[in-house]
Image: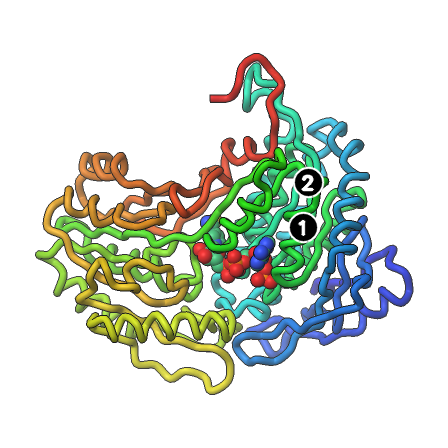
Amino acid sequence: MVKHDTKPAEAPPDERRELTFGKVWNYAPAPESTDHFAIAERYGLFVGGEFKKPKSGEYFATINPATEQPLAEIAQAGDADVAAAVSAARSAFPAWSKLPGDERARYLYRIARILLERAREFACLETLDNGKPIRETRDVDVPLAAQHFFYYAGWADKLDLAFPGARPRPLGVVGQVIPWNFPLLMAAWKIAPALACGNTVVLKPAETSPLTALRLAEVCQQAGLPPGVVNIVTGDGRTGQALVRHQDLAKVAFTGSTEVGKEIQRAVAGRGVELTLELGGKAAHLVFEDAAIDQAVEGVVRGIFFNQGHVCCAGSRLLVQESIHDLLVDKLKARMQRIRVGDPMDKNTDMGAIHSKAQLQRIRELVAAGEAEGACLHQATCALPGKGFWFPPSVFTGVASSHRIAREEVFGPVLAVQTFRTPEEAVEKANNTSYGLSAGIWTDKGARILWLAERMKAGVVWNNTFNRFDAAAPFGGYKESGFGREGGRQGLRAYLRFDGALQPG
Ligand code: TAP
């Protein structure tokens, strides 16, 4: 049995009390398990290597979306708190950036290893705070987060080799703002490459899912990361606003909605601040008549119902070749009926809770619009829990390109089905969107895959699979899905400037 102590070693007594007296949770799904972890009643801000009370004195609750039960009180960082975090990151930058790459790497490897050692704790915490099924946090979110730290640790002493002749240099203090759909994974996507390149960071997690970022702060302490290299400021959109507007940032990295991304672009304009934006999506998922149909159905299900559809690259527009439309839709309806919706902490659950009341309202609004505009709604019949936020797996057929459900990001378990006859028409319909994050193709013909992939305006194109991620693979969008790449060697570029004669290609 591994019993984890969440107490930070050097926190002053009053802060320590806040971090040690909390609810104790047994790991699900084994009620007899004595393997447990604590959630503090209150969390402070992680600034300069310590948890501190917010100068604002304000806290808000984070809740379990599957039960609506409060989990903990979270500090609301105001302008002065954000300024203190940026100042801590500035103070830490000279020493951290001068550390030899292999020494920086050691910290990243340590963080990765601790994440894996504490994987069950992180998986449970993420599921409680986010509502996503434990199977996904256990098998996807936590291992991938650790993989990002391992992967970028490997690059930390090879930056000159990654960009020969370009003399890569760190940027300075990076402000990072992330969304609620993959809280730990998005934190890892942001922090790992930034640190590997020698930057220091201030990260703001989403208001509704801050717990795993705060636990990651504890991992940074456990790994002995120098104070100030990573700072975590919690709060709502005002905290994000204060962070991206801070004058001492060298770079802003944002993942979230296109609407907020545009606002941030305006906020940093003219300040000489580097910016990367990972925004929304409305991915086309193409199925041709020669595809392995049962595998394609599994891919479609994974494409839209994984993480309750709260996925920026979700395959939310299914484009089916006309000749197999009825067959595929029938198979899809039958498959949807077997999706188990319910307690996210049950390892047999396929689809958990919708993340928040606000998101549930947004999904309901768009589904009502789909019906009002004349599309045909099919929903799996399943008993939904009485408490919490829930929505059944849903598919619209008879969708026109002008319908809101075909144009707007639902960010929920709602699929819009359209048809095409020729590959040219498929490409035209796939690209008929203001987004350009991802796409999927199911066909037996390799030549067709290459022909389509060249023509699709999407950052990622999956072939005969969907929603597969790897730290070595770059990820990012075109058009209103943003710019810049995360993951892979390309993910380093966003955190470096280049002083050499040769600029990276
Ligand atoms: P947003 O509402 O845009 O929020 C994202 C983050 O920005 C949150 O931490 C939010 O704080 C903060 N924020 C809100 N207003 C801000 C402002 N004016 N200035 C600075 N920060 C601000 O998105 P969301 O609802 O959390 O996430 C869903 C969206 O993220 C979807 O559109 C999805 O497609 C996109 N997303 C994209 C990707 C990639 S890789 N492209 C990955 C995941 C999600 P609060 O939490 O307090 O509002």
Viewer-side residue, 7 vs 51:
51
Determine crowd level at label 2: few under 14, some 14-19, many 20+ residues with C-alpha closer than 10 A. Answer: many
The answer to whether mark 1 and mark 2 are in CB contact below 8 A is yes
Instruction: Locate residue 471, reporting x and y percent.
Output: 50, 41
Q: Earlier in the sequence, mark 1 or mark 2?
A: 1
- Mark 1 sits near ligand 1, with its Cβ under 8 Å away: yes
Amino acid at pointer 1: Leu
Q: In which quarter of the image is residue 461?
A: top left
Viewer-side residue, 438 vs 384:
438
Q: Distance between the residues labelled 1 and 2?
A: 8 Å
For label 1, the residue is 243
In the displayed structure, 392 sits above or below 277; it is below
Viewer-side residue, 411 vs 297:
411
Q: Residue pushed farthest top?
A: 501
Determine crowd level at label 1: few under 14, some 14-19, many 20+ residues with C-alpha closer than 10 A. Answer: many
- The residue lying at 27 percent from left, 52 percent from top is 285
- The residue lying at 87 percent from left, 55 percent from top is 10
For label 2, the residue is 249
In the displayed structure, 220 sits above or below 352; it is above
Q: Quadrant of residue 179?
A: bottom right
- The residue lying at 79 percent from left, 64 percent from top is 56
Q: Is residue 166 left or right of residue 343?
A: right
Instruction: Locate residue 313, reporting x and y percent.
Output: 39, 52
